[in-house]
Amino acid sequence: MEIINPFEVKGNWYKGNLHTHTKNSDGQFTPEEICEIYSKANYDFLAITDHNRISDEIRHTRLLVIRGVELQPEKFHILGIGIKNEFYTEGNTAQYVIDTINKNASLVILAHPYWCGNTSSELLQLDGYIGIEIYNNVCQYLIGKGYSNVHLDEILQSGKRTFCFAVDDSHSEEHIGGGFIMVKAEKLTEEDILNSIKRGLFYSSTGALIKNLSFKEHLLSVHCSPAKSIDFIGYNASGKRFTGKDIEGAEYEIKGSEIYIRIEITDRYGKKAWTNPIVFL
Ligand SMILES: [Zn+2]
Ligand SMILES: [Zn+2]
């Protein structure tokens, strides 16, 4: 059994957004301006992921800025986060792009599958990504296709492990602050943040907060900011929903048939938080 629990490792919580555009592609702000905006909004780190352009190195006094890119092979949009070298993938397949990013960057994330029209079986044909975007703020803002939770469950049901990310994909001011991750890491350095993400030591949010997660003797417990529903979601029809007025936690007894459980929290304003899947194999 593998339990990845950021609440049980040492470190500090850092808030960040892994999907951001600037004037170097189709964004409203320069890289320097967007860093200042996120820094003022109390973010700790930001990945700049312009279309087809690897971001330049930026040193900001407070915000950790991570180099990234967004590439669009076939019908996929793919993020490379933590670029180490320049690279080119034009005209190649999605799998080639993923493999090349993996050689030259730290993380590969499949962006907004719902918005792209990707089916989960298409996502399952690809290998080498650490997660998919469960929530993309600009896709929600523009056409109401921000949530890819069904894609995530179908991938997990097939037995493949993957993490989930909430991101802004901000192109302009009104997209900022809608989707973010909270990462548990020792220090605010690129190495520590990316290593923690690779290990699944983070959760995703559009505003709801997870305060604790624990697993003891078949009981999985979560504490969170006041919520109207807490869903424990597992394989097929396994799992359970807890509802109430501003409930601040729930406890679920593992039956043994779930294969995985992920927790989704929704508050009275519709703000959500998602744990990564906890896989019981
Ligand atoms: Zn995209
Ligand atoms: Zn994008």
Image: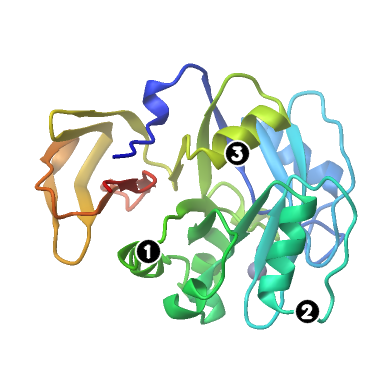
In this view, 103 is above or below 84? below
In this view, 154 is above or below 18? below
Depth check: 265 or 97 in front?
97
Few, some or many residues within 10 Å of mark 2 (<14, 14–19, 20+) = few
Q: Secondary structure at mark 1?
A: helix
Question: From the viewer's perspective, is 273 left or right of 40?
Answer: left
At which x and y percent is residue 222?
Answer: 24, 33
At which x and y percent is residue 138?
Answer: 58, 64
Few, some or many residues within 10 Å of mark 1 (<14, 14–19, 20+) = some
For label 3, the residue is 16
Q: Secondary structure at mark 2?
A: loop
Mark 3 vs 1, N-terminal side? 3
For label 1, the residue is 149
Residue at the (21%, 46%) spot, across then down: 230
Within the image, what quadrant is residue 209 found in? top left
Residue at the (36%, 43%) spot, across then down: 275
Question: From the viewer's perspective, is 79 left or right of 261?
Answer: right
Which one is in front in this view, the residue at disc 3 or the one at disc 1? 1
At which x and y percent is residue 1?
Answer: 28, 40
For label 2, the residue is 92
Q: Secondary structure at mark 3?
A: strand
Residue at the (13%, 41%) spot, across then down: 245
- Identify residue type, mark 2: Asn
- CB-based contact (under 8 Å), mark 3 and mark 1: no
Depth check: 101 or 207 in front?
101
- CB-based contact (under 8 Å), mark 2 and mark 1: no
